[in-house]
Image: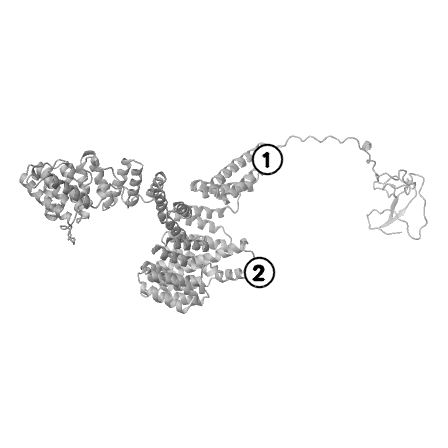
Amino acid sequence: RRLAHPGATMSYARGADEPLVPPSRGAPGTAARGGMATRTGPGLMSRAGGSHPVDENRPMTAVRAAGYTSAGRSNAGAAFDPTGQGGPAARGPAPPLAQKKDNSPEDMCRAIEREVNGLVEESAQLAAQRQLARALDKAKEAGKRERHLCKQREANGLEDQINIDLTYAVCFNLANQYHASGLYSEALNTYSVIVKNKQYAQSGRLRVNMGNIYYEQGKYPAAIKMYRMALDQIPTTGREIKSRIQRNIGNAFVRLGKFQDALAAYEPIMEHLPDVQTGFNLVLCYFALGDRERQRRGFAKLLSVRQLTADAESLETMNQADVSEDDGAKQALRERIRASHRYVSLAAKLLAASIEQHDAVAGFDWVIETLKAAGQAELATEVQIAKANHFMRERKFDKAVETLKSYERQDPALVPHAATNLSFIYFHEGDFANAAKYADLAMNHNRYNAKALVNKGNCLYARGELEGARQLYHEAMGAEADCLEAMYNLAVASKRLGDHGTALNLFEKLHAIIPHSTEVVWQIADVFDSSGQSRAAMKWFKILSARVPTDPGVLARLGSVHLKEEDETQAFHYHQESFRYLPANMDVISWLGAYFVKNEMYEKAVAYFERAAQIAPGEVKWRLMVASCHRRSGDYQLAHDIYRAIHDEYPQNIECLRYLVHICDDLGKKDAVHEYVVKLRKAERAVDVPPPEQHGGDGGHVPAEHAGAQGGRNDPPGESAYQQAMVAAAAKASRPAASVNAAAKATRATHDDDLFADDDLDDTLLPS
């Protein structure tokens, strides 16, 4: 007999030397109806034939239960179906589906909890996409639903199922969204609710976020207090988070100007867990305190940070392993390397010019050698170029050129950088030939050098080759898509060529990149004005005026645009504002004077023409305008005196003589009228045959026409070439000689010498 494991049921099997026992007469196919296999000893199984009662354990069967019989199956072709459920008739119709009962309160609470979780996740995703308004709305909705969930559970006696982690997540997300949206008071209140709840063991760390809010608000003492309270709750194992909080404390002390306290926060970090940003801040504090020796030590510590070399090695390993350029870890590593290099470069350039008290060259040389010794050859090259830039800022262009040329000879890697800067220097000095030469040299070393392409394009632009300049600016943008100089210059060149559509597109793209650039806004407004879109130009000039409200040029252009729209009131307002900020703009002065003459307010016009005469004393037309205003206002004697003074200074001035003839006749001075008529005839004859040479003011000077004559005869205000908003009569330089000659000939044909003084001069002899 076979042995079985104790306690295990074993089906019957005949041994090799056992006689075959036929089944009993009970149920066919079974071992015995009354007998069953029992345990006769520990682990032994035997077959007993007595009629013992059925045990609670399942009896050992033969093959009947599996569906086999000794007679075999009568329906041999039928499918195997031991349970009798094969046919449709046997199965019968399917039972109806059980009706789902109404949700219990517990199920309803779970559904609300899932909804709250979904709202929190959606809010976080919207915040990551910078859709802050929608993210805040979702966070508020999540807060409302979570409070409703807690009330439902309390009402149904499910207080033990209240999820405090969900409450924490909802409040934390809401505080974050308040902070991101600039609602600092609401964010601080929400954070306070969390940190005051004793159920959240780690909530004290959120005081860092509260400190950040106070820092953004400029409340640095409160920020320091919060940072220190958070620091007390960080365990000793959290070294990295402790160092970051300590750095925040140092930053707040720097904002307060307490550099010694900031050093007390930065120096322990550099001793135990140094990083590039803290090292840079430490150098800045040493620089602010003026401690040159500690600046050297701080810069050496900054260069010894392991992060600089570790990141470079990791990037090299990724490059060797052919890691995809789109890999997130690789991009993050490159960004960290770029930030580290920026910190070191700024620190190097800052110290180089100040570390030696009276010798900037020695300071630059020390920094360059220190960087080379630390294995930062690329940064050393940047400092070498910064050395030349330092000379340029000091207006020592000869030393800058000498320095760049020396680097060009010493290090071939510096050739393109040096050539680019040399081209820039020569261009600003007006030496376009050398500027083009060095731009070509830089382009020969690297055809995709965007700065060199821009410099070459500038040289062509200065020579008037606008199409060639445009092509180079296009090429520079292709080499470096974010080259703002190339984009701006291309737009300016397109505007000069009359391609206003291209220029406007480029300027609008620039405005999207650098929205605070007043130059770009000015160019957009100017393009609209040049293309005849006065309404759009007015809009952009108003935007510009809001940013620079005291710029007289912008105010004058606004007046010009309003004048195009025939809004003379607003045009006068903006011209007057422009005059208030810059009372020396001749275009604005002449416009305002002509405006008052047109409106017959001669006393006010006199003040502007007198100012113009003070600014340009060599221009006789302004003094003639002053005298004419006095004459029109009825002060003939004062006008006569001014004309006499002008005649004494400019005896050959025909306009002045005409006015004198006219006003002397009005005053009844017949002798003076005859005298001035004779002088007028003589001056007009001199105009008929001009002398071979002009001699200053009393020679062949012909004065400008007067702005506005009598009543409605003066022309409406026109536009000058610069401002496009000037009065045509006030802006003209002089009357054409042909018209003067024609008037003189007509006078001589009508009057002879004896009778001329008796005729009254009408307004046809006055300047129109």
Type of amino acid under label 2: Ala
Question: Can you say whether 436 is above or below 497 in the image?
Answer: below
Type of amino acid under label 1: Cys
Q: Residues within 10 Å of mark 2 (few under 14, many from 20)?
A: few
**Residue where numbered disc 1 is placed:** 109
Q: Is residue 324 left or right of residue 18?
A: left
Q: Is residue 94 left or right of residue 658?
A: right
Is residue 719 something one can see in this rendering?
A: yes
Q: Residues within 10 Å of mark 1 (few under 14, many from 20)?
A: many
Camera-near label (2 vs 1) is 2
Position in image of residue 19 (x %, y %): 95, 49
**Residue where numbered disc 2 is placed:** 321
Identify the mark nearer the N-term, 2 or 1. 1
Is residue 352 something one can see in this rendering?
A: no
The foreground one among 489 and 287 is 489
Q: Is residue 77 left or right of residue 506?
A: right
Which label belongs to residue 578? none
